[in-house]
Image (cartoon, rainbow, N blue to C red):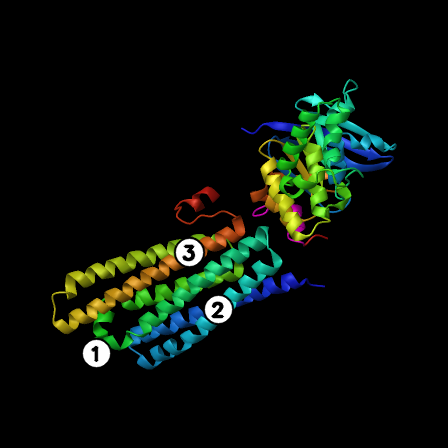
């Protein structure tokens, strides 16, 4: 029996008058990779950003329904959003390292959480860089600027930065779409390794990537969840015709 | 505008049908040659096998190209996976037609043995079975899957009956008759292979339509009803 980590129930999201997500319910399993796919504007990124309340930053945003993580309603007024985002890390399409050293990028999160001990910080930085499969490439230049790294390395550094605060969930918004095939495959390999310890939700426009990295795939269309199933079933025998048309490129 | 991918898929579909028709023609002619001891027609079958082989390679290459360049998924993936197998099964059927054709001259002078054993019925049933396989390939109607399994079972039963009769009635006769009877048994074994290959193709088409792998399971059609 799979453990459900994130649940959305009757969720609707509006940006002003525009409906971005329309009365959607979904269960996202823990310690698995769930890929969200669908055409632009289908609501997949909106849903991803709802999970760590990134949408709060958009003034016209409002929602109805419920989103729970480990059974706790994340839109409850008692929820500490900073703590929530510590538990739920996020990696974006464009790698966005700070204009600081490699070390400081990874140490940044633990530091603002109050960790000062140098030894502990060093340990966290090393472990996080190792988990993000970039340690060997940067261990001799930890104090060089992060901006000197390649695009693929910067993205793995950002993943290390996310891991440094010990999250439970990692949200990825097209994490490899700006990367070359070798960097992309490193990120995909990393995703495979990370799912042992984290729940991962990834938005991707690359269908083959969804097929390669995820355990479950959810197909969104016009703000609705059309179908969610094991990835192997979605890509061999989807239940809904809309899903079939989308993944085979016959859409519209 | 039709996408390049769809044009490739249609080409594959029509090549498979072409292969099916070619093999059906080979089977019809070889069976006709067999029951009439028509060596000339049998030689034509042997000669035409070349066309089956050429088409076999063309289909393999087309499947390889679509896999490599289009990364098919869902129904497209099932179709191309199955096209490879169906192509292989059809090509094997073509080889069986040649196997029979090569032995047609063994029966010159022994036509009455074929008549007594009602070999014409086996020949007709084999041709009908291959025709049904072709209908399934072009229509992809799941109801025909059952017809094929039934027809192939009936043919197998028929073949077994005749084979036993050969052993009982002919194997103690003259040396020449025993040689003919042995060749006949070998041919009947190949007819049984036609049944197995037809079943394979029926299962492949079932997989295309339903997305379920049903080979080695006898009762998959019962789940349907």
Dot 3 crowding, Cα within 10 Å, few <14, some 14–19, many 20+: many
Q: Which residue corresponds to the image point at 75% horizontal and 26% vertical from the top-left? A: A111
Q: Position of residue B156 (x, y in %)?
A: 31, 57
Q: Which residue corresponds to the image point at 51% horizontal and 69% vertical from the top-left? A: B58
Dot 2 crowding, Cα within 10 Å, few <14, some 14–19, many 20+: some
User: Upstream in the sequence, badge 2 or badge 3?
Assistant: 2
Q: Image quarter for residue A139?
A: top right
Magenta-colored span: A235-249
Q: Image quarter for residue A24?
A: top right
Q: Which residue corresponds to the image point at 65% horizontal and 46% vertical from the top-left? A: A243
Q: Which residue is mark 2?
A: B57
- From the image, state whether disc 3 or disc 1 is nearer to you: 3
Q: Residues at marks 2 and 1, common chain?
A: yes
Quadrant for the N terminus of chain B in the image: bottom right
Please state the chain letter of the residue tagged with numbered disc 1 in the rendered image. Answer: B
- From the image, state whether disc 2 or disc 3 is nearer to you: 2
* Position of B138 relative to A110 (above/below): below
User: Upstream in the sequence, badge 3 or badge 1?
Assistant: 1
Q: Position of residue B50 (x, y in %)?
A: 43, 75
* Position of B116 relative to A166 (above/below): below
Whether residue B159 appears in magenta in the rendering, the answer is no
Q: Which residue is mark 1?
A: B109
Q: Which residue corresponds to the image point at 34% horizontal and 60% vertical from the top-left? A: B193
Q: Residue furthest bottom?
A: B40
Whether residue A242 appears in magenta in the rendering, the answer is yes
Q: Closer to the camera, B191 or A9?
A: A9
């Amino acid at each position: 029996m799979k453990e459900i980590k994130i649940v959305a129930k009757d969720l609707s999201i509006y940006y002003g008058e525009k409906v971005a997500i329309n009365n959607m319910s979904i269960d996202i399993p823990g310690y698995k990779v769930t890929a969200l796919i669908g055409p632009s504007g289908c609501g997949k990124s909106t849903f991803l950003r709802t999970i760590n309340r990134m949408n709060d930053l958009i003034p016209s945003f409002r929602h109805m329904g419920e989103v729970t993580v480990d059974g706790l309603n994340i839109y409850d007024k008692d929820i500490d959003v900073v703590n929530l985002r510590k538990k739920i890390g996020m990696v974006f399409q464009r790698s966005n390292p700070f204009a600081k050293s490699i070390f400081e990028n990874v140490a940044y999160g633990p530091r603002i959480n109050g960790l000062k001990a140098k030894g502990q910080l060093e340990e966290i930085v090393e472990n996080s860089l190792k988990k993000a499969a970039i340690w060997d490439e940067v261990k001799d230049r930890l104090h060089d600027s992060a901006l000197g790294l390649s695009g693929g390395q910067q993205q793995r550094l950002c993943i290390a930065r996310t891991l440094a605060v010990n999250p439970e969930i990692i949200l990825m918004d097209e994490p490899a779409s700006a990367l070359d095939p070798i960097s992309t495959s490193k990120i995909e390999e990393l995703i495979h390794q990370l799912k042992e310890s984290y729940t991962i939700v990834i938005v991707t426009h690359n269908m083959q990537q969804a097929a390669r990295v995820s355990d479950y795939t959810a197909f969104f269309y016009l703000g609705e969840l059309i179908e969610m199933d094991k990835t192997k079933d979605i890509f061999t025998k989807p239940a809904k015709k809309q899903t079939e048309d989308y993944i085979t490129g016959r859409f519209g | 505008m039709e996408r390049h991918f769809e044009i490739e898929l249609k080409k594959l579909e029509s090549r498979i049908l072409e292969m099916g028709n070619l093999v059906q023609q080979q089977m019809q002619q070889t069976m006709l040659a067999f029951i009439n001891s028509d060596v000339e027609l049998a030689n034509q079958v042997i000669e035409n096998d070349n066309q089956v082989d050429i088409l076999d390679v063309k289909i393999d290459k087309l499947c390889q190209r679509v896999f490599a360049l289009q990364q098919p998924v869902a129904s497209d993936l099932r179709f191309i996976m199955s096209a490879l197998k169906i192509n292989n099964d059809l090509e094997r059927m073509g080889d069986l037609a040649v196997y029979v054709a090569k032995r047609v001259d063994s029966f010159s002078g022994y036509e009455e043995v074929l008549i007594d054993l009602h070999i014409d019925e086996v020949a007709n049933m084999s041709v009908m079975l291959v025709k049904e396989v072709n209908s399934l390939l072009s229509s992809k109607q799941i109801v025909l899957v059952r017809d094929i399994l039934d027809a192939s079972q009936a043919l197998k039963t028929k073949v077994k009956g005749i084979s036993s009769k050969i052993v009982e009635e002919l194997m103690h006769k003259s040396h020449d008759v025993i040689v003919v009877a042995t060749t006949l048994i070998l041919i009947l074994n190949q007819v049984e292979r036609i049944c197995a290959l037809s079943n394979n193709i029926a299962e492949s088409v079932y997989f295309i339509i339903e997305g379920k792998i049903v080979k080695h399971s006898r009762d998959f059609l019962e789940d349907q009803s």
